[in-house]
Image (spheres, rainbow, N blue to C red):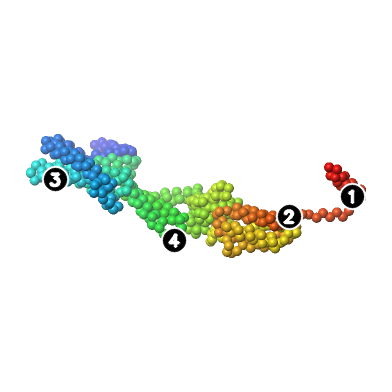
Amino acid sequence: MPAKKDNIEDMSEAVDKAKSSSIIEIKSDIPLQEHAQGLVEQIKNFFQLDSLIQLFVGIILIAIAYIITTIGKKYIKKLLKGEEEDEQTFSKTTEVWLSRLVRVLFPAIMTILLLFSYQTAKWLNLPSDLLKILTNLSVAAFVVRFVSTFVHSKVVAKWVAGIVWTIAALHIVGWWDMISELLDSIRFGMGENKLSLLMIIKGAFYFIVFLWVAKILANSAEKKIKNIDELTPSLRVLFSKLLKIALIVTAFMFGLNAIGVDLTSFAIFGGAIGVGLGFGLQKVVSNFISGIILLLDRSIKPGDVIAVGSSFGWVNTLGARYVSIIQRDGKEHLIPNELLITEKVENWSFSNNDVRLHIDIGVSYNSDIPKALELCLEAALEEPRVNQFPKPVVRVTGFGDSSVNMQIRGWINDPVNGVGNIKSDILLKVWDKFRDNGIEIPYPQRDLHIKSLDSNIIEKIKNDVKAELSKELKS
């Protein structure tokens, strides 16, 4: 006997291990069977004559409610469009409430008719159990439909209304406990840690609700951040993105906690992932942090004219990993954010947009130098992009081998529109003025001094010159 008892215990342990190691497990409980028997009884009662009569009355009332709703919707739409004889002008608030009335008109009329029939049957001592259920379902449909009118997205409103009304209907007919136990008896997973189907459905519901609330809060906060004038556009975008990410992560954590997942189990796992990401994504993280620093200290912002190494142009966008710089030739350079933090950067519009131009010009030694200075100053003053205050000046910078060197100095406040083009415009004006006033821009000149030369060579040169002159005279 003891041996048989030990065998039975071993077999039971083996069965328990097999159950715990299975992927899908269905638990059979006695309350579930009792609910099933009650469901069968309800179905039997449903086919009785009293229930069928109540069902027929309910169908007739629903049809009447549908007809009245169709007529009422047409009338309300005409009022909104102002097509009635007594044309009225409604305020925005009134139009919103009338549009909500259109959406709840059918369940409202259906609830009134069913409630009236239920009270009448109860007053006449007639069977009214099914009418009571239909009335409660109608009231639930009206409340859910009315609340869903406050949701802006019609798709989301339909899904939310359908789910909430289904849950309410299961409670009303008394099937909620049975469905819950049935879903809870179906489990998925390996070993002892298994998730029931009910827990999975609840988890999905919690995730949807929390993410929806997080989205609403993020959109509301983003609108408020955009109205803060003290923040630059780049900082507004940064704070909005960070807040949205934080709310989504928080909603995800709340969803895991709602379905019973222990968040402390993610500590070691998250630490290991953090170490791996720290080594594998070192440059990416460095560029991301550098981008945040650039946004916070506002040293570089969209529209600035900057020079980084051989790249020169204006800043187009500030990304999480790089800064986009567009050059004058249309080429777009993507500069990693880390370089803008560690390397030397020329920002022509950091504190202000004022940039000083230096334009070098040379004139001949035989020219009227004061007149040349005056003409250069006129050319600078005639350029509309050159600031009149401080006034541009022209200075003599030195005496070169072939020319007297001068420099035009002036200020502009729109470097984003280009620097090379304004220099070209001023030089063209200087060229025209020099040509009209006889100011010469010399070629490079060199003086050649010959210390000694053979007399035969000198005689040959003279003869060649005489021969060339005689040919020109004869021609």
Q: Earlier in the sequence, mark 3 or mark 4?
A: 3
Disc marking residue 116? 3
Disc marking residue 404? none
What residue type is disc 2 on?
Pro
- On the image, numbered disc 1 is attached to which residue? 458
Q: Earlier in the sequence, mark 1 or mark 4?
A: 4
Work out whether residue 233 can be spotted: yes
Q: Nearer the viewer, mark 1 or mark 4?
A: 1
Q: Residue at x 58, y 62 (%)?
A: 388
- On the image, numbered disc 2 is attached to which residue? 442
User: Where residue 82 appears, x then y in whole percent?
Assistant: 27, 47
33, 16: nearer the viewer: 33
Q: Is residue 441 above or below residue 77?
A: below
Does dot 2 land on a helix, a strand or a loop? loop
Q: Residue at x 32, y 46 (%)?
A: 153
Q: Where does the C terminus fall, quadrant-wise?
A: top right
Work out whether residue 137 can be spotted: no
Crowdedness of circle 2 by 10 Å Cα count: few (<14), some, many (20+)?
some
The answer to whether residue 264 is left or right of residue 330 is left
Disc 4 vs disc 2: Cβ atoms closer than 8 Å?
no
What residue type is disc 4 on?
Glu
